Image (cartoon, rainbow, N blue to C red):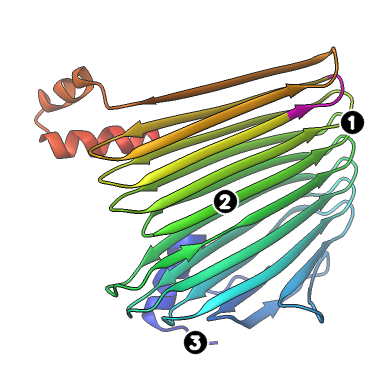
Amino acid sequence: MALDNIQKNMLSEIAGLEAIPEGAFSLRLDGQSALRQSTENIEIVPKTDKPGIDIYIKAGTKGERVDIPVIMTKTGLTDLVYNDFHIGEDADVLIVAGCGIHNAGHDKSEHDGIHAFHLGRGARLKYYEKHVGEGEGTGERVMNPTTVIEMEADSYMEMETAQIKGIDSTKRLTKATLGDNATLIIHEKIMTHGKQFAVTEFEIDLNGEGCGTHAVSRSVAKDDPHQEFISSINGNNRCSGHTECDAIIMDHGSVVAVPKVIANHTDASLIHEAAIGKIAGEQLIKLMTLGLTEQEAEEQIVNGFLR
């Protein structure tokens, strides 16, 4: 299918794709399924009871990639989609998701994506998700992603999410349940500016013996936005858990961090950290002595922090 220039640019930014890939792929465009293709080991099936797809990855599948980008270019559109991922035992795959909203109008455009992952025994998954908003319109760009994760014994999931620009309001919920010796790694990056609003919430249940998680959020609040970080790790067995929030606050931004760990087992080892602060003056001075302006120095520091 042919994409216009706005759609092509958005696809490149959120998924790093310059063309439709040869592998498993599902493109959702302005609230509708626009293109879908499966492979021998990965089947993508449209849901019949609600909007969305089921992705079935065969046991033992190695080295394959699934792309599921969402692009919205119509103002005033609200899109709700349910995507379920079934990763078979001992599979090792990459899933790349992303949503881009280009709003050139005056009405709100909103995408709410509910993703559910079920990892079979010994499965390994890397999941990348990037959210971007743009467009010259005054209408809001809203994204509310929900991620639900169920991990069987010996499975591993690495989740990287990024929201760097253009989203006016977002509520991000991640809920996970881990089985024996399962491992969940989460790295989140968020930048808000203007009067934007962002809430992140992690709820992780460490139910299995020997399971563990490392959940980190890094954010920058610039201009006059508001951010909230809420994290709850429940140690219900012999397990290890670490949750961390690091935030840079600039101008008139505000940030709330509420990391929480709950030990329900004597062998649960849990740590929480939170740090909020402005850019250190000596960092700015050091870069400015190298010839950068104050604004350029700030940008370098922020980019390095969110890398």
How far apart marks 2 and 1 lie (CA) works out to 26 Å
Residue identified by numbered label 2 = 172
Residue mark closest to the camera, 2 vs 3: 2
Instruction: Residue at 83%, 69% (x, y): give it.
Output: 40
- Give the quadrant of the C terminus: top left
Question: How many dots with numbers?
Answer: 3
Q: Quadrant of residue 20?
A: bottom right
How far apart marks 1 and 3 lie (CA) works out to 46 Å
Q: Earlier in the sequence, mark 2 or mark 3?
A: 3
Boundaries of the magenta span: 234-238
- Residue lying furthest bottom in this view? 1
User: Going by the image, does 58 lie left or right of 271?
Assistant: right
Q: Earlier in the sequence, mark 1 or mark 3?
A: 3
The local secondary structure at tag 3 comes to loop
Amino acid type, residue under disc 2 in the picture: Arg
Residue mark closest to the camera, 2 vs 1: 2
User: Does the image show residue 93?
Assistant: no
Q: Which mark is residue 2?
A: 3
The image shows residue 241 at horizontal and vertical percentages of: 70, 24
Residue identified by numbered label 1 = 180
